[in-house]
Amino acid sequence: MRSNRKIMILALCTAMTFLGVYMQFFYGREKAADKGTGKEEGEMGTERFYDYRQRELPDTEHIPEGEAFTEGERIEIYFENTEVLDQGSLPLPVQAGLAGYTQKYLYRNGYTDVTELYIEEESYTEDAEKIMFRCYLDGHEEMLQIEYRLGEGRLCFLIL
């Protein structure tokens, strides 16, 4: 009697497992294939807004009007080529706040028209004490030198 009960429980668990796998991986695909890409009026869609596989992307590039990263502060500048920073040892929190700190420094020094900074890849240096690189400022002959002092954990800026 007890072994029959265990066999029934095992069979039930196995059937539920197969049903769960089927529902998870195959059931939604069959319904989506039957529907096609269009939705009928009044029908609830399961299409995700970030899934662009079946959509045509716009021809124009998205250029933000300035992104708010902190309350009341809008970031209007961006770095054009950050591959050298991505491959370097600059800590991610510092790299994430780099545009905001740079904008504050440039605005305080009268460079409010700068919106784009291009990193001079040859100037990038790292050692045990600091990470340093220079950037071209759009519309200006001067360059901006950015230095991150590892021991102090702070950014230093200098216009050259």
Image: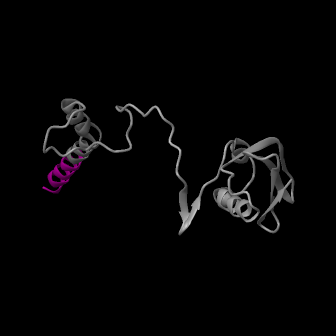
Q: Nearer the viewer, residue 124 or 102?
A: 102
Residue 22: percent from left, percent from top: 25, 40
Q: Nearer the viewer, residue 106 or 95?
A: 106
Left or right, residue 129 beside residue 17: right
Q: How is the image coloured?
A: one colour
- Identify which residue is drawn at 21% across, 47% down: 16
Q: Nearer the viewer, residue 108 or 33?
A: 108
Q: Which of the 4 image quarters holds residue 111?
A: bottom right
- Identify which residue is drawn at 55% across, 54% down: 66
Count of residue discs: 0
Q: Is residue 9 magenta?
A: yes
Left or right, residue 99 beside residue 65: right
Q: Nearer the viewer, residue 118 or 21?
A: 118
Q: Which of the 4 image quarters holds residue 15?
A: top left
Q: Which of the 4 image quarters holds residue 145?
A: bottom right
Left or right, residue 124 beside residue 90: right
- Identify which residue is drawn at 65% across, 50% down: 115
Q: Is residue 143 magenta?
A: no
Looking at the rendered image, the quarter that the N terminus falls into is: bottom left
Residue 73: percent from left, percent from top: 57, 65
- Identify which residue is drawn at 48% across, 35% down: 60
Indicate whether 46 appears above or below 147.
above
Left or right, residue 79 beside residue 69: right
Residue 114: percent from left, percent from top: 69, 51
Residue 97: percent from left, percent from top: 65, 60
Prevailing secondary structure class for the magenta stretch in the rendered image: helix
- Range of residues picked out in magenta: 1-14
